[in-house]
Amino acid sequence: MTSFQKHVGVPAIIAVTAAVAIMALDDSLGPRPLVFPFKYGAIVVHVPWLLTLILIGAGATFLAKRAGASFAERLLVALSPALLIGGAVNLLMAVVVISASVGGQRVHPIDFVGHFIVGWLVFPSIALLLGSVPFLRGGNSPLEPSPASVSKG
């Protein structure tokens, strides 16, 4: 196993798998999502899922830090569920908008900004980063020394 797989791949796969599983549970067993009007489309907020993303971000970043990941690698691991899930949802949205436009349907792509970009990228990223903050500090960060190097003093 390469160091990238160990530092990023394994924690990111665990985080994405957990986020998808929790979203499936939230969708089938959880409360209805909240819907907020927004200038560019409605924002759908899955509250239980967002709250568990805080824990998922913390756990994944902890695993990456424990594996010896650098600050940038830990940040990538922390954001991996939002990047992969949100990226897939936004790619699907782009295909739907293009298909509808080609098919002669009247489509306003700007209306999808609130739902897809804010609801599937921005809010999940914020939740994941909130959980990961304690594990982004210290360790292999270029900004702060690791606790081990400070104690050797």
Image (spheres, grey):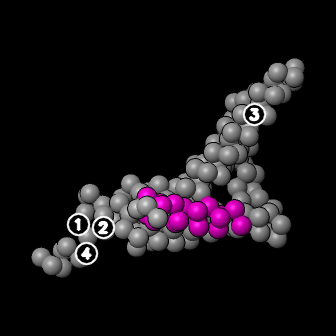
Which residue corresponds to the image point at 26% horizontal and 57% vertical from the top-left? 142
Q: Residue 89: x, y in percent?
A: 70, 45
Task: Name which residue type carries label 2.
Answer: Gly
Q: Position of residue 65 (x, y in %)?
A: 40, 69
Residue at screen point 82% across, 21% down: 102
Residue placed under numbered mark 4 in the picture: 147
Q: In 3D space, how far apart are the residues under numbered discs 4 and 2 (Cα atoms)? A: 7 Å
Q: CA distance from mark 3 to mark 2?
A: 42 Å
Q: Is residue 30 above or below residue 124?
A: below
Chain-order first, disc 4 or disc 3: 3
Q: Residue at x 73, y 51 (%)?
A: 44
- 67 horizontally vs 94: left or right: left
Residue 52: x %, y % from top left: 62, 69
Residue position marked by numbered label 2 in the rendering = 138
In the foreground, 55 or 94: 94
Q: Main secondary structure of the magenta part?
A: helix
Mark number, residue 145: 1
Which stretch appears magenta? Answer: 4-21
What amino acid is at disc 1?
A: Pro
The reply to whether dot 4 and dot 2 touch (C-beta < 8 Å) is yes
Quadrant assignment, res 54: bottom right
Q: Residue furthest right?
A: 104
Amino acid type, mark 4: Pro
Q: Nearer the viewer, residue 34 or 115?
A: 115
Mark 3 residue element = helix
x, y percentage for residue 45?
70, 55
